[in-house]
Image (cartoon, rainbow, N blue to C red):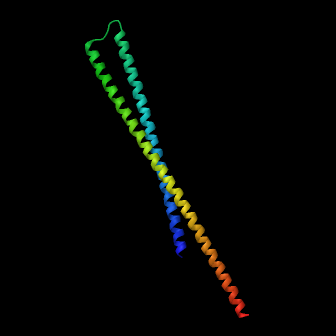
Amino acid sequence: MKKRHQFETAREIADLRRLQLERARLDTVRVIQLHQRSHAREQSLCESLDAHVAQWRDALQAPDGLSPALAANWAGALASARAAHLHAQQDTRDTASRVERQRAVLARHEQQTEHACGVAARVERQFELQRDEQRASRIEDMYLSREERQ
C-alpha cells in the first residue's frame, strides 16, 4: 500500500510539473511576442525619427530657408520624436531582459519536470517489482499449502 501511495503521489507531482511546464511555455511565448512588438515599435519610431531628420535637413537646404516659428516647431517635434524613440529603446531592453528571465524559468521548469518524471518512473518500477514479488509469494504459498495437504 505504501509503495502504491508513493507511486500515485509521484505521478501526481509529475503531472503537476508538466502543467507548470506548459504554463511556463505559454508565458515564455507571451513574453517573446511582447518583445517582438516592442522591437517593432522601436524600429517604427526609429524610421519616423530618421524621416523627421531628413525632412528637417531638406527644409534647411531649401532656397527660401525656414521661418523661426517653423524651425522652433520642428525642433520641438524632433525632441518629442527622439524622446519617444529613447522610451521605445528602453522598453525593448526591458522586454529583452524579461525574455531572458522567462527563459531561465522555463529551463528550471523543464528540469523539474524531467526530474519528476524520472522519480515517477523509478517509483513505478519499484511498485511493479513489489507487486510482482507479492504475486510470486502468494503463488509460492499456494503451492506450498497444496503440497502440505497432499
Task: Work out whether residue 25 or residue 131 is closer to the camera in this orientation and state it.
Answer: 131
Q: Tell me the residue at 41%/43% (across/down).
A: 98
Q: Tell me the residue at 49%/60% (across/down).
A: 16
Measuring from the top left, give residue 139's x and y in whole percent: 68, 82
Q: Is residue 37 visible?
A: yes
Left or right: 17 as drawn, with respect to 83 = right
- The quarter holding residue 88 reads top left
- The quarter holding residue 31 reads top left
Q: Is residue 42 above or below residue 103?
A: above
Measuring from the top left, give residue 29's x and y in whole percent: 48, 45
Q: Residue furthest bottom?
A: 149
Q: Is residue 123 above or below residue 65?
A: below
- Rendered-image quadrant of the C terminus: bottom right
Q: Is residue 27 visible?
A: no
Q: Tell me the residue at 39%/17% (across/down).
A: 54
Q: Tell me the residue at 70%/92% (across/down).
A: 148
